[in-house]
Image (cartoon, rainbow, N blue to C red):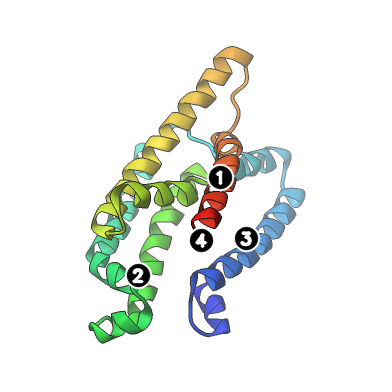
């Protein structure tokens, strides 16, 4: 995705978002094809993973995911200074000694490792990675030494609360909706409010 984003020249937020949308569309099409040719049990398991689930996992899998997350997180924390300088612009960061291309690649790979490890067991849970960083930055400021731990704790808290809400729905209705469905229902309106707030501030 990073290579695709670079096709337009300098890597920016807009190019990364567009590349992400393209890859998401392609991945969704591939998953839909896999579901159509899979056995019914496997197709249902795939659908549950796509909607986002929080289930009990074997200790060995939890240990593996935890090790991958800790590795990626340590790499990200080691690059917080570069992140702060990159936020000032590529030219400014380069003038202050940051190897912009290498730093961006390292940040992208480390964050991808963390996300991939979590998604491999929880599936796709919408809006957590979009809303939590926005509000963490609003509360804690732009310093990534605070933003990163705030995002980890905030994302985990939101996921636990969403799972609790899903289990409460099960007690009331006798069926438990996927966690990802709840975060999408709540996150969608919040995202629209966030966009309107940004537009008004602009």
Q: Are marks 3 and 4 in contact (CB under 8 Å)?
A: no
Residue annotated with mark 3:
24
In front: label 4 or label 2: 4
- Side of 93 where 171 appears, left or right: right
Percent across and percent down for residue 197 are 52, 50
Residue annotated with mark 2:
87
Q: Are marks 1 and 4 in contact (CB under 8 Å)?
A: no
Percent across and percent down for residue 92 are 31, 81
**Which is more N-terminal, label 1 or label 2?**
2
**Which is more N-terminal, label 3 or label 1?**
3
Is residue 79 something that shows in the picture? yes
- Side of 26 where 166 appears, left or right: left
**Which is more N-terminal, label 2 or label 4?**
2
**Which is more N-terminal, label 4 or label 1?**
1
Percent across and percent down for residue 103 are 33, 76
Q: Residue furthest right?
A: 36
Tell me the distance, in whole angstroms, between the alpha carbons under discs 3 and 2: 26 Å
In front: label 3 or label 4: 4
Is residue 126 something that shows in the picture? no
Query: Relative to 113, does residue 193 appear above or below in the rendering?
Result: above
Question: In percent of the image, x 72 and y 53: which residue is there?
Answer: 32
Tell me the distance, in whole angstroms, between the alpha carbons under discs 4 and 2: 18 Å
Corner quadrant of residue 186 = top right
Tell me the distance, in whole angstroms, between the alpha carbons under discs 1 and 3: 24 Å
SS at circle 2: loop
Corner quadrant of residue 189 = top right
Crowd around label 3: few <14 · some 14–19 · many ≥20 (10 Å): few
Residue annotated with mark 4:
202
């Amino acid at each position: 995705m990073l290579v695709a984003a670079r096709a337009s020249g300098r890597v920016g937020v807009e190019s990364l978002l567009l590349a992400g949308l393209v890859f998401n569309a392609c991945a969704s099409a591939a998953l839909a094809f896999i579901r159509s040719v899979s056995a019914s049990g496997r197709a249902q398991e795939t659908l549950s993973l796509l909607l986002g689930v929080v289930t009990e996992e074997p200790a060995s899998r939890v240990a593996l995911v935890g090790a991958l997350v800790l590795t990626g997180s340590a790499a990200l924390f080691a690059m917080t200074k570069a992140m702060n300088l990159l936020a000032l612009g590529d030219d400014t960061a380069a003038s202050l000694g940051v190897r912009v291309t290498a730093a961006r690649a390292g940040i992208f790979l480390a964050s991808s490792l963390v996300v991939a490890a979590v998604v491999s067991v929880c599936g796709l849970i919408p809006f957590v990675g979009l809303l939590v960083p926005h509000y963490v930055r609003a509360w804690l400021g732009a310093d990534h030494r605070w933003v990163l731990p705030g995002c980890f704790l905030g994302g985990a808290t939101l996921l636990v609360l969403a799972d609790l809400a899903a289990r409460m729905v099960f007690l009331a209705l006798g069926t438990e909706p996927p966690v990802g469905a709840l975060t999408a229902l709540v996150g969608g309106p919040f995202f629209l409010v966030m966009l309107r707030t940004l537009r008004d501030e602009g």
